[in-house]
Image: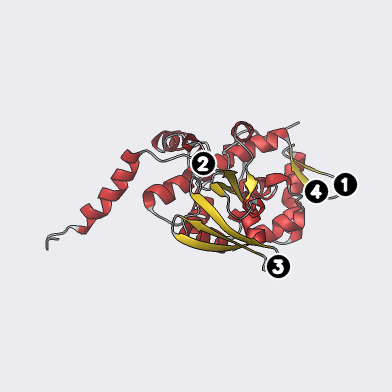
Amino acid sequence: MTRHHDPADLSSAAQEYLLALRVMAGDERRVTTAQVGRHLGVSTQAASEMFRRLVADGLVEQHEGRDLVLTTAGRAAADGIFRRHALLEWLLTSVVGLGWAESDEEAARLQGAISPRVEARLDELLGHPPTCPHGNPIDADTARRRPAGVPLNAVDAGQHATIFRITEEAEEDAALLSYLEARALTPGARVHVLARSESLDSLTLEGPRGRATLGLRPAGLVRVLLGDADPTLFHRVPLRVEAVDAAAPMQVAKGPSGA
C-alpha cells in the first residue's frame, strides 16, 4: 500500500530521487539505479538503498531489467515536486534574473523548503505556468493536452519552425542550456534551418540572435513545431511581476550621493 501522496511528507532526499527519475525518464528513456546515482553524484549502493525505500512505499517499481519506473502515486508525487521546481525556476529567471543553468541549481536547493501556501502564492504571482521555463509540461495532465513536437534535428534545410521545448534530457546539460539561452533559442523562438549535414554532424540555423550551430544529437534534444506556432502555447510571466523586478535595482542603486 502506498504510504506517501503529498510531496511535503517526503524527505528532501526522497524528493530529489523522485524528481531525478521523473526528469531522466522523460521522452520514455530507460533509467537504472546506477544512472540516477551518477546523476545525483552518489554511489550506486546509496541510490539502491533509497530506491528500496521508494519501492516499499509504492512510489517506484523496479522491473526485471533493472529499469526504474514511477508508479501512479510516484508520478503524482514527482509531478508535485517538479511543479515546485518549475515555479522556482520561473521566479529565479523571470523575476530574479538568473540564467537557466544557475536557476536550476538554486531551485533544487529551495524546492523542499517552500510551504503549500507559498507554492500557491507563487503560482498565482507567476500567472499559473503550465510548463517550466524550458517548455516541459508541469504535470502528466498538461503533457497529454500539449502537442509532442518534433526533434529539431529532423527538420530539413529551408524549413521554418518554432522552438517548443527543451527536453528534460537537455536540461541535464548545463553547457547546452547556457548556449541555447545565449542564442535566444527558447520556447516560442522562430528559427529557419539553413543547413543540416550528416557528414559534419551539425545543424545550422538562423535564430533571434543570428546564426547558431548545433550538433545533431543536441539538436535532437530540442523539440519544435513546424512553421509558426500558436503563441498561447508559450507561458509569459505577467508584466506586473517583471515591472517590480525592473524597478527594484533602480531603487536600490539610488543613494544619498545621488544618481
| Screen quadrant of the N terminus | top right
Instruction: Kindly report which numbered mark, 2 or 4, lies closer to the viewer in this rendering.
Output: 2
Residue topped by disc 3: 199
Q: Is residue 201 above or below residue 11?
A: below
CA gap between label 2 and label 1 equals 44 Å
Amino acid type of disc 4? Answer: Asp
Farthest-out residue, left: 257
Asked whether 186 or 26 is in front, the reply is 186
Amino acid type of disc 2? Answer: Asp
Q: Earlier in the sequence, mark 3 or mark 2?
A: 3
Amino acid type of disc 1? Answer: Glu
Dot 2 and dot 4 residues touching (CB under 8 Å): no
Query: Residue 228, labelled with which disc?
Result: 2
Tag 1's secondary structure? loop
Label 2 environment density (alpha carbons within 10 Å; few <14, some 14–19, many ≥20): some
Asked whether 51 or 130 is in front, the reply is 130
Query: Residue 130, labelled with which disc?
Result: none
Instruction: For residue 3, say whether it is visible.
Output: no
